[in-house]
Amino acid sequence: MRVKQYVVETMPEAMLQIRKDLGSDAVILSTKEIKVGGVLGMFRKKRIEVVAAVDNEQKKQAKKTAASPVQNSFTPVPRALVPEAYAQTARSFVTASDEEAAASTVDHSPQEKSAMVPVVSRSNHEDAKMDNGSISLSSEHKPRPQGADFSGSTSTKSESDSEQQQDKLLSELQDLKQMMTKLSRQGTVVETFPEALLSWRQRLTEQEIWPEVWESWLEPIQEKLTEGEMQEQDIELALQSQVIHFLNERIQEGILPTTRIVYVAGPTGVGKTTTIAKLAAEQMFKKQRKVGFITSDTYRISAVEQLRTYASILNVPLEVVQSPGDTQRAISRLAHCDLIFMDTAGRNYRNELLVSELQSLLAPVENSETFLVMSMTAKSADMVQITEHFSKYGLDKVIFTKMDETGTCGPLFNLLHRFPLRLAYVANGQNVPDDLLKPDAEWLCKALLGEGKQ
């Protein structure tokens, strides 16, 4: 047995060298990740150590088989059709040879199959350059190689069984290719980031920041480190600058002075009614604007009474509506107010019918703004689905509530990255109106990167 060791950057590179040096019968014995190079134990690069071997007896047997005369001869076929030609040729050999040869040709042990699949996958990738959707796995649409006649080589039943085995093998090869491409991409990402940035990447990952977001922050820093334009001790300030720049482009504080009507929408349980009371108190005490309330939340028990209590405390008028006609009449009755807040009923965002009911009420008019209220305790995936549903009716700004109930603020950044919304307020408690804050880029950056990082 011939054994050889390789130190490479990626697994595809290792398989290419193994196939070149040891042939297609080679078996990968072990793989492990190592670090090489560096100075005084630092700046070491990650590599993959692969140990492969080939049995000399198998190699001699393969040469003997290749040298023996073959009764059937075939016209060369295009490379894209090589997998089909291999299967058809194998069936011809099964018919021409005895049962033992057929068993040795077709039936491989699980260990041999597992060793052969990576080499075959690499061969298909190099020869045919096939991507995930480049070939059809349906046996009804497989092209036949020109000049090759395989009719009558096997029975109908054996052909059906062989085609099923071929389809299964091609499917496994495609899955293996996708897995190796993913592993190769992950290895490249790990390798491209120097050690100095790994702790920051870990921090952002723990905060549930999407990779597409933290990559846009860390890649410019990595380029400057590579070109020698930045020292490692400057990484912290550079990352803070990236985060603050991201937020400054997406923050639009408060309610515009020209706004006449503010629609407040969102799913159930995010604190819309309490947020409306905070907004109204801010506009009354800090902007000296006369405020009125409209509520359509007649589905939730005590919802109207809750807003009525706030209206009584703030001494502002309240109108209750149940239809679009009621809404127009309520707006007319509150025409003397400088600013009108409309509270909508919380809806299950997964129910299209319930959410679509808001369309008749959320009819943006001139000098109006629509605010989406989101809870920071929700997951990023849920936030995205909620925003996609409510975006159908026009959203301008977003308010994040319950900042005090979670230590993870990554979903806020993910949502602002995905949708063209402006961050208007953040709420970190239930006190009216003290716990309604205008967003501050430096404060949010500090919450994201951690107290000890600032």
Image: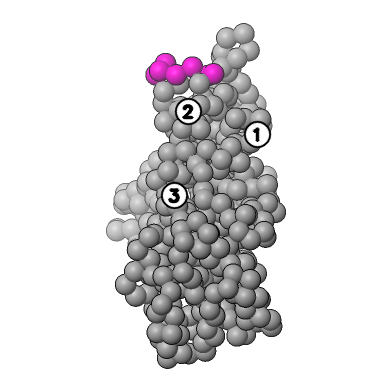
In which quadrant will I find the C terminus?
A: top right
Crowd band around label 2 with a 10 angstrom C-alpha radius: few (<14), some (14–19), many (20+):
some
Q: Which residue is mark 2?
A: 238
Name which of mark 3 and mark 2 comes first in the sequence.
2
Residue 373 place in picture, x, y as percent: 54, 64
Please tell me which of labels 3 and 1 falls first in the chain. Answer: 3
Q: At which x and y percent is residue 61?
A: 57, 36
Question: What's the magenta region?
Answer: 227-233
Q: Residue at x 40, y 18 (%)?
A: 229
Disc 3 to disc 1, how far (Cα)? 22 Å
Relative to residue 417, is residue 358 depicted above or below? below
Residue topped by disc 3 = 251
- Specify few, some or many for label 3: CA neighbours under 10 Å numbering under 14, 14-19, or 20 or more: many
Identify which amino acid the numbered label 1 is placed on.
Answer: Glu
Tell me the amino acid under the disc marked 2.
Ala
Q: Is residue 348 visible?
A: no
- Residue for badge 1: 451
Q: Earlier in the sequence, mark 1 or mark 2?
A: 2
- What is the secondary structure assignment of the residue under circle 2? helix
